[in-house]
Amino acid sequence: MKIDLHNHTVLCNHAEGSVDAYVEKAIEAGINVFGFSDHAPMHFDPEYRMSFAQTEEYREMVMKAKARYAGRIDVLFGYEVDYLPGYMDDRILNADVDYLIGSVHFIDQWGFDNPEFIGRYEHEDIDRIWREYFQLVEAMAQSRHFDIVGHLDLIKVFKFMPNAPVGAIAEGALRAIKEADMAIELNVAGYRKPVGEAYPSRELLERAYELGIPITFGSDAHKPEQVGLYRDEVEAFARSVGYTRCATYSRRDRELVTF
Ligand code: ZN
Ligand code: FE
Ligand code: FE
Ligand code: ZN
């Protein structure tokens, strides 16, 4: 089975293409389960996400596609939710979804993965921001709100690497993820970014495997052409670490299937 649970829609204002175009691309790529997980609304950084008023429209778009393509591909409905204390909303956290991806995109309200704000790295202690990032991932797991950790080591996006060993920095977060029984995703967006590799790195994926943390897969597509890209590479990567099964969800119930 080919599972792809991280994909966006035009509602987030920084993606393009119709829902149908994404689903058709997924069918072409041989994907069996295709999930939309668009950026959930919040009262912070509103220009990069749908509004609360658009959540019904989002649900309808996805549900229509689910019905239209039934029998050819299984379309799932989820959100990518920012872990940002003070800005998370129960309407999203308790929404009737197949799954929630929890992602850290902000450190102290700094959008560290946005090229617009890349200048701030010059003024930061890289080891310190790596520690802060993984502390936020750890707190996110402890919050128990989410099913999947989005792009586990996103902080590497621009390739500002720490001096301290990454494994030690991320260990607390990985243990919390295991404790919370969450999955991590193999997210291929990193191949399109300066870091030039998947999230997470081999080192962190090997540690996740040792801990028995399940994986799933995500294109993190913001255009239909990005659906299914690097799929063979990332599957081979997961297999080389020892994984043979990946997670899929229905109404927040997880099932592991062979990939
Ligand atoms: Zn996005
Ligand atoms: Fe993200
Ligand atoms: Fe995303
Ligand atoms: Zn993402």
Image: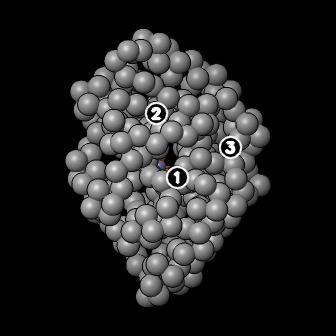
Residue sitting at x 50%, y 59%: 213
Label 2 residue near ligand 3, CB within 8 Å? no
Q: Quadrant of residue 253?
A: top right
Cα distance in 3D space between marks 3 and 2: 21 Å
Comparing labels 1 and 2, the label whose residue is closer to the camera: 1
Instruction: Select label 3 or label 1 by which is in front.
Output: 1
Q: Is residue 133 visible?
A: no
Q: Which residue is mark 3?
A: 42
Q: Looking at the image, tell me whether mark 1 or mark 2 is earlier in sequence order.
A: 2
The span from disc 3 to disc 1 (Cα, nearest Å) is 24 Å
* Residue closest to the eye, 106 or 33: 33
Label 3 residue SS = loop
Residue in the foreground of this view, choosing between 254 and 201: 254
Q: Could you tell me if residue 66 is visible in this image?
A: yes
Q: Which mark is residue 183?
A: 1
Q: What x and y, as percent, mark residue 92?
A: 69, 37
Nearer to us in this view, 150 or 132:
150
Quick check: 163 left or right of 234? right
Q: Amino acid at mark 1?
A: Ala
- Closer to the chain start, of discs 3 and 1, is 3
Looking at marks 3 and 2 on the same chain, the residue that comes earlier in the sequence is marked by 2
Q: Image quadrant of residue 29?
A: top left
User: For mark 2, what is the residue?
Assistant: 35
Mark 3 neighbour class, 10 Å CA radius: few under 14, some 14 to 19, many 20 or more: many
Q: Is residue 251 left or right of residue 246?
A: right
Quarter of the picture containing the C terminus is top left
Name the element at disc 1. strand
Frontmost residue, 91 versus 249? 249
Q: In the figure, residue 53 lies in which quadrant?
A: top right
| Relative height, residue 131 to residue 11 (above, below) | below
Q: Amino acid at mark 3?
A: Met
Tell me the kind of residue under disc 2.
Gly
